[in-house]
Image (spheres, helix red, strand yellow):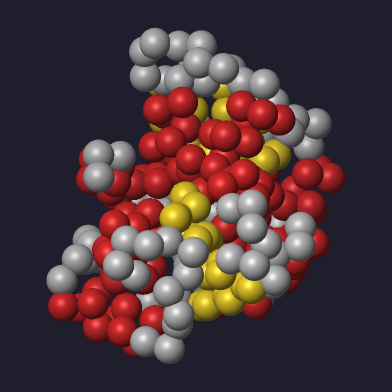
Amino acid sequence: MKIGVFDSGVGGLSVLKSLINSNFFKEIIYYGDTARVPYGMKDKDIIIKFSLEALDFFNNFNIDMLIVACNTVSAYGLDSMQRQTSYPIVGVIESGVLSLHNKVQDRNKKILILGTKATIQSNIYAKKLESLGYKNIKSLQTGLFVPLVEEGIFSGDLLDSTFRYYFSEIEIPNAIILGCTHFPLIQNEIKKYFYNKPILIHSGEAIVEYLTKNYKLKEMHSNEPKISFYASNNPKAIESYAKIWLKS
Ligand code: DGL
């Protein structure tokens, strides 16, 4: 099976890593819109426009499925994208919510959702969780983590003070949804900040669970898939990030 993975930039590498490890796929085409990242600070209409333009890119590749690794695109662009294609397009939000639902049965547990400004303003995670009966949900924009992670700041003083800035008023949650591609890179630090108490929902792991359940995908290949990286600006930079992100 040949799939596409779309992200606003390099962040989708965190999802790509899980997709590679799943051994589901023979070939993966990764495309990051690095010329126009970040999407997380932009308005709904422009996010939808960019998301639809990404489909033009994938038209050249005859893919069997498209994974939208970006939470921001999954929040706003997914429905419009799905209307335009004959192949399935799977985003990370539905899968993240279902993964949480599998892991947290008690609807009174405290759930913290982290994401970009756009994802949090869409309120999509909270609405889906509420519809499943969860009552104790807090959503938080933590956009500063995006440039920190892209700078390779995965620990240390700067990250610690950003944690204090965002989390000082937040009660220790039972579960945290890492609702942005970049946050898995600092997941251990986030967990540590909350005394290792919360369970974390990682978009990449969640989508693999989702594909297993909903698309009946199985381990098919013992070798790594063939991966090609494309970007709207500086594709070489994605390959350099991949060397770090696919390992950490
Ligand atoms: N990929 C985006 C997300 O998961 C983060 C980077 C951006 O703002 O474009 O929401």
Residue plotted at (66% across, 29% down): 213
Tell me where residue 154 appears, x and y as whole percent: 23, 62
- Determine which quarter of the picture holds residue 155: bottom left
Residue plotted at (78% across, 44% down): 82
Tell me where residue 63 appears, x and y as whole percent: 63, 26
- Determine which quarter of the picture holds residue 61: top right
Q: Tell me the quadrant of the picture where the N terminus can be found.
A: top right
Between 10 and 214, which is closer to the camera in this rendering? Answer: 214
Given the current orientation, which residue lies at the most extreme left position?
156
Q: Tell me the quadrant of the picture where the C terminus can be found.
A: top left
Asked if one can make out residue 48 in the rendered structure from this viewpoint, the answer is no
Between 38 and 107, which is closer to the camera in this rendering? Answer: 107
Asked if one can make out residue 135 in the rendered structure from this viewpoint, the answer is yes
Tell me where residue 81 appears, x and y as whole percent: 75, 48
Between 229 and 208, which is closer to the camera in this rendering? Answer: 208
Q: In the figure, 121 relative to 61: above or below?
A: below
Residue plotted at (16% across, 78% down): 157
